[in-house]
Amino acid sequence: MSATAFAPASVGNVAVGFDVLGLSVHAIGDRVTARRIDEPGVRIAAINGVVRDLPLDAEKNTAGMAVLSIIRDQQLKHGVELIIEKGIPLGSGLGGSAASAVAAVVAANALLSQPLDKLALLKHAMKGEEVASGSAHVDNIAPSLFGGLVLTVGIDNPNVKQIPLPANVRCVLVHPHMILSTREARKILKPTVSLSDVIWQTANLAGFLTGCFTGDLRLIGESLEDVIIEPQRRVLIPGFDAVKHAAKDAGALGCSISGAGPTVFAWLPVASAERARDGMVAAFKAHGLGSDAWISPLEPNGARLID
Ligand code: HSE
């Protein structure tokens, strides 16, 4: 008995919701096949695709740990073998560890006689994400599992809300060929924030969400700006300012770091998306970095069984 699931990449934070807001992007993702085996625990049989050099020890692997969490919680007698197919580059800021954990729990869930609901799967996938990044944030797990623009309130008993997506907007993603570790990008953040920045960022998050609920692109354009995290992390990404400038120049509603970076994302009206992509790629090139780029529609679809 086996099942295969696909889980999409995601943009963590979406500029204004550090650790609580995320957006699924369907251009790329990870696949995991889960097979029931007699021996207990999780056996990782293979890791293929764009990343292969990941731990085979289930306790140290995001997909492995997420499925171990299900096995322990459900006190299953059988074990699970996993084959992981990575479509998301390592350390790219596109939620690769989350996508592997999410695809693994969705595939393993299909092997259960009484499948778990999505909120239970979210908690198990979080155990996997913790292995990779050292903290239990959900801003990649939740959109990869539920799909679309997702706000998560609370950690122990999370409320997960899919936010309406504005029409005729595209998400441009440009991934420069370099690796940034989420752990490192979190370590550099200052532990305190000034009151004026908190006020500004709170207004931006509220404005952005209101803009999404009401389809108000002007309000989205005024509020899709990170005044707390981006100013601290931008130095980790060569050419970031020029890339952002190129996106804004092409008419971006907003442009910031995807998750912990180095991928940079921008929201654009459909008609300007290609121009922004080309400008962003050229800006990275001018700073000596090759890149991959995608234009993703904003869609509310999350992880799914494909076999
Ligand atoms: N919210 C996390 C961070 C996402 O920015 O550190 C990591 O993918």
Image (cartoon, rainbow, N blue to C red):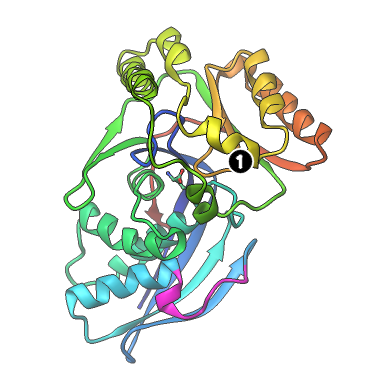
Task: Give the quarter the ligand 1 occupies.
Answer: top left
Query: What's under tag 1, amino acid-wise?
Result: Thr
Residue shown at the point (39%, 42%) measured from the top left: 191
Q: Position of residue 74 (x, y in %)?
A: 18, 74
The residue lying at 47 percent from left, 26 percent from top is 226
**Which image quarter: residue 263?**
top right
Examine the structure image and report whether residue 40 is included in the region drawn in magenta: no
Residue 307 place in picture, x, y as percent: 42, 63
Q: 206 or 27: nearer the eye?
A: 206
Question: Against 243, is 1 above or below?
Answer: below
Q: Which x, y percent locates residue 248?
A: 62, 16
Q: Which residues are magenta?
A: 52-61
Q: Quadrant of the N terminus?
A: bottom left
Main secondary-structure element of the magenta-colored stretch: loop
Magenta run includes residue 56 = yes
Asked whether, in this view, residue 19 is left or right of residue 275, the answer is left
The answer to whether one can see residue 149 in this image is yes
Q: 141 and 36: which one is in front?
A: 141
Q: Mark 1 — residue?
A: 263
Res 250 seen here: no
Q: Position of residue 121 (x, y in %)?
A: 27, 59
Above or below 20: residue 9: below
Q: Is residue 76 left or right of residue 24?
A: left
Considering only vertical position in the picture, is 270 above or below 103?
A: above
Task: Identify the residue shown where x is 61% and y is 51%.
Answer: 180
Helix, strand or loop under label 1: loop
